[in-house]
Image: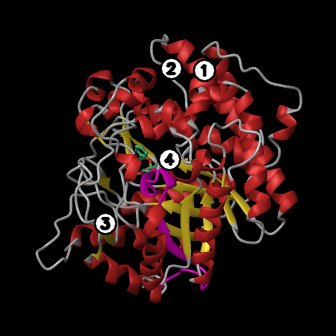
Amino acid sequence: MSNFPKDFLWGGAVAANQCEGAYKTDGKGMSLVDILPDAHHGRWDALMHPKEAEKTTYDFYPSHESIDFYETYEEDLELMAEMNFKVFRTSISWPRIFPNGDDLEPNEEGLKFYDRLFKKCRDLGMELLVTINHFDTPLALFDKYNGWENRKLVDLYLKYCEVLFKRYKGIVKYWITFNEINMLLHIPFLGAGMDVSGLDENDALQKKYQAAHHQLVASAKAVKMAHTIDPDCQVGCMLAAGEVYPNTPNPKDVWAAVESNREGYFFIDVQARGYYPNYALSFFDQNNIKLEMESGDLEALKDTVDFVSFSYYSSRLISADPEVSAETGAGNVFNNLKNPYLKTSSYGWQTDGLGLRITMNNIWDRYQKPLFVVENGMGEKDVLTDDHKVHDDYRIEYLKENIVEMDKAIEDGVICLGYTSWGCIDLISAGTGEMAKRYGYIYVDRDNDGNGTNKRYRKDSFDWYKQVIKNNGI
Ligand code: P53
């Protein structure tokens, strides 16, 4: 027996910029990620100094072709249907719809692609969970406005939203306004299309929270707009989650964990409760951050989300002691310590299934809104055997551990709409730009340099996940 409700939405997740390729096809404009190289050619440096990166010519841009999902989506979706997917999470590429971000009219050819893609999903019996902005703000808006630093982006985003909500009314049931909204504090280029390099810490913080305010207002207004245009759709926020644990019972470590958890919850507190929490106002005061607001902004924030979605890869670990913190950590972005109780993948990410149960319970207790686990998974180097098999027992083990704990969270009383594991088909890694860091049930024969047949193969985890869905989590 499992505790998953009968209508639990099992499926998988991808993002346009990491799988579609076709970076100039049918009138698409350049997106932020289209100027980035892979990890072996300085991706991290490029993410932190995007203005410099834009002036640099790299040998290879992984997003330009990616896995060519733009061409192969039909057969790819058929494989997902074969695994019994009930839902498919993808994103819409903003620069396919508005190539320069501020065009007067949307690009009809770009919309037609999503018409076809969504129709195919629906024909295969899958619901759609669609992220409106997943790291691919039009590059032109970075050039012109330094992205979300500028208030202008709110109106441009809402214009884009209006096109989507009207066109996909009755077709897309679940919308997510911003992928991992808290990522803008860690990778401002991906999260908010802005460059804050060269600024002192305080100025950078000021700009990041101003951008956050713009996204929070845009998100709340999008919720209201979506409900007006299509009363049957649901709109969610999305957090890069993972409970932060204190390194020791030293209250200083515990307090550091409280503050670190709040750094992410800050966004969801606003999106799910409808106002700025006191600890944030105090933080702004202490750091001399002054948000510019328009009259009506605080009122607009009151339109809260219908569900709270999040990515969960692992828990995190923090210490208040600078000497301990200086030790190398696990994971790439959040700079956390390595937890000695957990297994570590070859990419340094750790497995903590119970951490998912803890995270789900905490988010549920905080908001009392339905949850949606929209990313979870293990990025590993897979080996394709001569007979075209991939024996990814490590991935099955990771997913099993997490799904078992998700089941327990539901038993604890958490309401959860569904689970879409990340990168259900191998795609380009956001952090490293590699093909080699694979999450899929479906193997794609393409390497870090873009070589390979681009053929698809079912991994061992494919058959396993198919059974998990068939048996509703047992
Ligand atoms: P990758 C880290 C870096 C960038 C994006 O990450 C991230 C994270 C992890 O929290 O968030 C999500 O590909 C993101 C996806 C991404 C996935 O994590 O670096 O929403 O776009 O691919 C996995 O291994």
Query: Can residue 345 be seen from the camera position used here?
Result: yes
Is tag 4's residue or tag 1's residue first in the polypeptide sequence? 4
What numbered label is drawn on residue 207?
Answer: 1
Q: Which residues are magenta?
A: 1-22
Quarter of the image holding residue 138? top right
As drawn, 151 above or below 199: below
Note whether ligand 1 is within 8 Å of mark 1. Answer: no
Query: Real-space Cα distance between discs 3 and 1?
Result: 38 Å
Q: Are marks 3 and 4 in contact (CB under 8 Å)?
A: no
Residue carrying label 4 = 24
What numbered label is drawn on residue 196?
Answer: 2
The mark lying in front, picked from 3 and 4, is 4
Is tag 3's residue or tag 1's residue first in the polypeptide sequence? 1
- Crowding at mark 4 (Cα within 10 Å: few <14, some 14-19, many 20+): some
Q: Amino acid at mark 2?
A: Val
Which x, y percent locates residue 8? Answer: 58, 78
Query: Real-space Cα distance between discs 4 and 1?
Result: 31 Å
